[in-house]
């Protein structure tokens, strides 16, 4: 198993070189000393990912896994989460943090700007598979789509030039899923600053996603049967607020006219 | 700030959540209290706000200005395997994708723009240093892959999506022709992680990052039956599966 020891090994090697070669010219010795010092500074800042992963897991194991043996034994047999949650891939908005979801509570999809694309077997099979599995197999009771403040994906959407030219391989094509949110905001709030337009688009994009959820027949059926609710959420980390709202969708009983 | 990232910093000072909250959420007994999703969301956010956000204002103020995660993580959508929980991550540490069976398909602008966008943004905009793909035990997606072809049931999306891991299934079956049941599933869950790491190499930004030594790839496996986390591969262990 490979370990991350690039810096330490290099530093050791250089030190050894210096100590074994007393006859090194002064210039060479000074250079080696400088290199060693630079490496030591860099090493202190270096992310040691394998160690981070191991220590993180050790903490989880002692503080959660071993303290809740009954729970984890049940979870080992199967999951029955009440929620399916769509949240942005942004490192600051994980629902396990902001809504304190514990193991077993929420089936999760994380993608750029927490977008739900419309039903499309060719273009969006990943999203379709997750929704299909959650609704038909896990029978989740709630789908929650969470947008958030300062979303890079939404900013990217709002920054696409009006002629539609794109520069990225994937990003702009992906965020265009919520192009109607952008159009709405530009039409209604075109006079506002870009940051304010982005804030409005962040919320509007959630509504577009909620609408797109209904293009999946299994979602629509479950909503009509009242076995599933569809909700939107917005996490604002500038003022520490969380808003949640519901998508109302039903068919009223027919009236005889 | 570095103290806050220290795992031990919050363990003893946490205001305890309702001890029964987690149990209630997973209860399947006869006298299960009615579940109110709005109340659950409200309680969860308040817990976060009191125990995290309000306790570390400087940290969250800095984070609000920008994120600089060192990690991009791929994990399964499974409710039991959130890396935030199992690796005790702090907000700001990891940019994340969650999908069925933690798959990374190869570069494909038409079919997999969601995955491509995440990788493109993580590397080019955020300049993450490490990509981690985390597989796990008893994965429903891999289980479904192993049951294919299925003449009785068909899905609109699931079978097509999990087929991203088909090379892993085929490799395992050819190397372990007598494996079956849970043993076979575990082998495929792990091989699928390796397959995803190889697929990462099909993205030019990943190749450039590796060549410039600015990027590291790690494969991991979380076994929640035994309570173990295994590092499967780091960087140079990853070789394409093609046998010539």
Image (spheres, coloured by chain):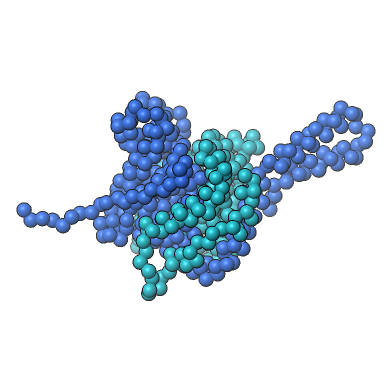
Kindly indicate the quadrant of the structure image that contains residue B26. bottom left
Residue found at x 34% / y 27%? A191
On the rendered structure, is A12 left or right of A43? right
Of the pair B98 and B94, the residue shown nearer to us: B94
Toward the bottom, the furthest residue is B30
Q: Is residue A157 above or below residue B157?
A: above
Residue found at x 37% / y 45%? A116
Q: Would you say residue A223 is visible in this rendering?
A: yes
* Total numbered labels: 0
Residue found at x 41% / y 59%? B40
Toward the top, the furthest residue is A163
Of the pair A149 and A113, the residue shown nearer to us: A149
Q: Would you say residue B158 is visible in this rendering?
A: no
Image location (x, y in percent) of residue B151: 36, 61
Chain B drawn colour: cyan
**Which chain is the one coloured blue?**
A
Residue found at x 41% / y 70%? B28
Of the pair A128 and B52, the residue shown nearer to us: B52
Image location (x, y in percent) of residue A187: 30, 30
Image location (x, y in percent) of residue A162: 36, 26
On the rendered structure, is A23 left or right of A178? right
Image location (x, y in percent) of residue B118: 49, 41
């Amino acid at each position: 198993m490979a370990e991350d020891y690039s810096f330490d090994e290099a530093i050791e090697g250089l030190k050894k070189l210096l100590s074994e070669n007393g006859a090194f010219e002064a210039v060479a010795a000074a250079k080696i000393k400088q290199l060693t010092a630079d490496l030591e500074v860099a090493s202190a800042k270096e992310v040691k990912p394998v160690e981070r992963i191991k220590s993180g897991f050790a903490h989880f194991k002692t503080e959660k896994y071993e303290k809740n043996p009954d729970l984890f034994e049940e979870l080992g047999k199967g999951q029955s989460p009440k929620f399916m949650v769509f949240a942005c891939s942004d490192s600051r908005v994980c629902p396990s943090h902001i809504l304190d979801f514990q193991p077993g509570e929420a089936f999760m999809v994380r993608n750029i700007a927490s977008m739900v694309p419309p039903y499309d077997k060719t273009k969006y099979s990943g999203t379709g598979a997750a929704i299909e599995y959650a609704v038909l197999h896990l029978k989740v009771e709630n789908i929650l789509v969470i947008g958030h403040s300062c979303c890079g994906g939404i900013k990217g959407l709002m920054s696409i030039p009006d002629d539609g030219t794109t520069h990225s391989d994937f990003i702009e094509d992906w965020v265009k899923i919520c192009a109607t949110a952008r159009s709405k905001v530009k039409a209604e709030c075109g006079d506002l600053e870009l940051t304010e337009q982005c804030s409005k688009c962040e919320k509007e994009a959630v509504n577009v996603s909620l609408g797109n959820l209904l293009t999946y027949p299994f979602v629509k059926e479950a909503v009509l049967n009242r076995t599933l609710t569809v909700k939107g959420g917005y996490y604002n980390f500038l003022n520490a607020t969380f808003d949640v709202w519901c998508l109302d969708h039903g068919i009223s009983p027919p009236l005889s006219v | 700030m570095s103290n806050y990232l220290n795992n031990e910093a919050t363990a003893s000072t946490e205001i305890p959540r309702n001890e029964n909250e987690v149990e209630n959420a997973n209860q399947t007994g006869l006298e299960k209290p009615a579940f109110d999703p709005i109340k659950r969301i409200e309680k969860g956010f308040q817990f976060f706000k009191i125990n995290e956000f309000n306790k570390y204002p400087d940290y969250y103020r800095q984070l609000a200005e920008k994120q600089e995660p060192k990690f991009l993580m791929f994990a399964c959508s499974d409710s039991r395997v959130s890396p935030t929980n199992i690796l005790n991550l702090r907000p700001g540490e990891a940019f994340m994708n969650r999908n069925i069976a933690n798959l990374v398909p190869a570069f494909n602008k038409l079919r997999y723009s969601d995955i491509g966008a995440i990788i493109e943004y993580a590397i080019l905009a955020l300049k993450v240093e490490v990509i981690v793909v985390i597989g796990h035990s008893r994965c429903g997606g891999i289980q479904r892959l192993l049951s294919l072809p299925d003449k009785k049931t068909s899905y609109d999306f699931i079978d097509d999506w999990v087929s991203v891991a088909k090379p892993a299934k085929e490799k395992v079956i050819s190397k372990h022709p007598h494996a079956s049941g849970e043993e076979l599933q575990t082998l495929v869950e792990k091989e699928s992680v390796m397959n995803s790491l190889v697929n990462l190499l099909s993205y030019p930004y990943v190749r450039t990052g590796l060549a410039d030594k600015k990027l590291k790839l790690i494969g991991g496996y979380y076994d929640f039956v035994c309570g173990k986390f295994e590092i499967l591969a780091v960087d140079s262990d990853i070789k394409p599966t093609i046998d010539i």
